[in-house]
Amino acid sequence: MSVIHNELDYINALAASDPAALAAQSEARYKNIIALAAEKALGKHAGGAGRTILLAGPSSSGKTTTALRLAQALGARGVQTHRVSLDDFYYENTHMPLLPDGTPDIESVYALDLPLLRATLRCLEETGRADVPHFCFKEGKRTRWDPLTTGPNDLLVLEGLHALNPEITQMAPQALKIYINVSSRIYDGKGGIVLNKRSLRLVRRILRDSQFRGTGAAETIGMWPGVTAGEDRYLSPCKKSADVRVNTIHIYEPCVFAGRVLPLLEEIQTDAPAGRQAGQLAKALRRFAPLPDKIVPKDSLLREFLG
């Protein structure tokens, strides 16, 4: 596997001299990891170890795109693969579990309609057909049901924050388990951290939320401690069970995201509750040489956040 050159000076130098090579390097590394994961899945499937792949990762780690690229890689190898998102199995707002302060605990595995998920997987296993819900986050409810039909030799990729939780893994005990995350920091020339792993994901989430979920940067930053606390509580204890790990960092992403995210951060007043963290993120992003969106391939994981 290729080395990740996650140093600020390297990133900025290549962004200035050969930005296409910088982007291509990141994209090739990610595609190679997907290819290896696909081969691992095929090996397990050929051994009769089940038809399900469980893919988990924290917020804005790139679960949706990774599940899609894995399905495409398996399809190119002759195995029809279907994707199902655990996000579509969220309870509607009126049925969410609550935190002690009375707010919805959306990070809990019990925010998912586990009986519905169990019934859906059983139906697919027994009949090869099920109706899968589609959950709209802006409306906080299921807005439609889509029919899913699977063949006897097809694979299913089930992705979501809780895909490795025992509540889920017991539904597919022979599944291949994959854990994805941003697993590298970006350093300066003196070994100091410019952007840590969670900050990289927060930048991704600010961009995604502003475009696709109708949420402003201040609100996203305000929710972030609860999001990461939920990850620590519900995901981190489960990741050790993974058969495969995927690092989704693309080292040129801060260069591309800065142009979109900086204006959102700069709208936040310094004395606002999110002001301090917004200022820190903005200061870090200004250190990266800016690159235009057009340098990002249409099939890149980064498009999950850029659109």
Image (cartoon, rainbow, N blue to C red):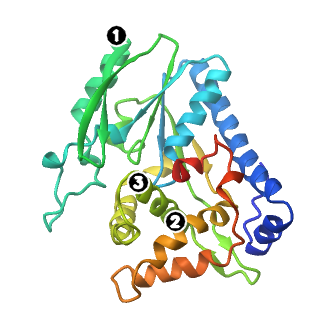
Q: Which residue is mark 3?
A: 235
Disc assigned to residue 127: 1
User: In the visual, does 79 lie left or right of 108?
Assistant: right
Along the horizontal axis of the image, is 141 left or right of 37? left
Q: Nearer the viewer, mark 2 or mark 1?
A: 2
Residue lying farthest to the right in this orientation: 17
| Residue 33 picture location, percent across and down | 68, 42
Query: Quick one: 239 or 114, which is closer to the camera?
Result: 114
Alpha carbon separation for disc pair 2 and 1: 42 Å
Residue 203 image label: 2
Q: Amino acid at mark 1?
A: Thr
Where's residue 165, x and y in %?
37, 45
What's the residue at 59%, 33% (across, down)?
Answer: 70
238 relative to 243, above or below: below
> How many numbered marks, from 0 up?
3
Residue 168 versus residue 251: which sits nearer the camera?
Answer: 251
User: Gap in Å between the C-alphas at discs 1 and 3?
Assistant: 31 Å
Q: Position of residue 80 (x, y in %)?
A: 56, 18
Q: Is residue 236 visible?
A: no
Q: Earlier in the sequence, mark 1 or mark 3?
A: 1
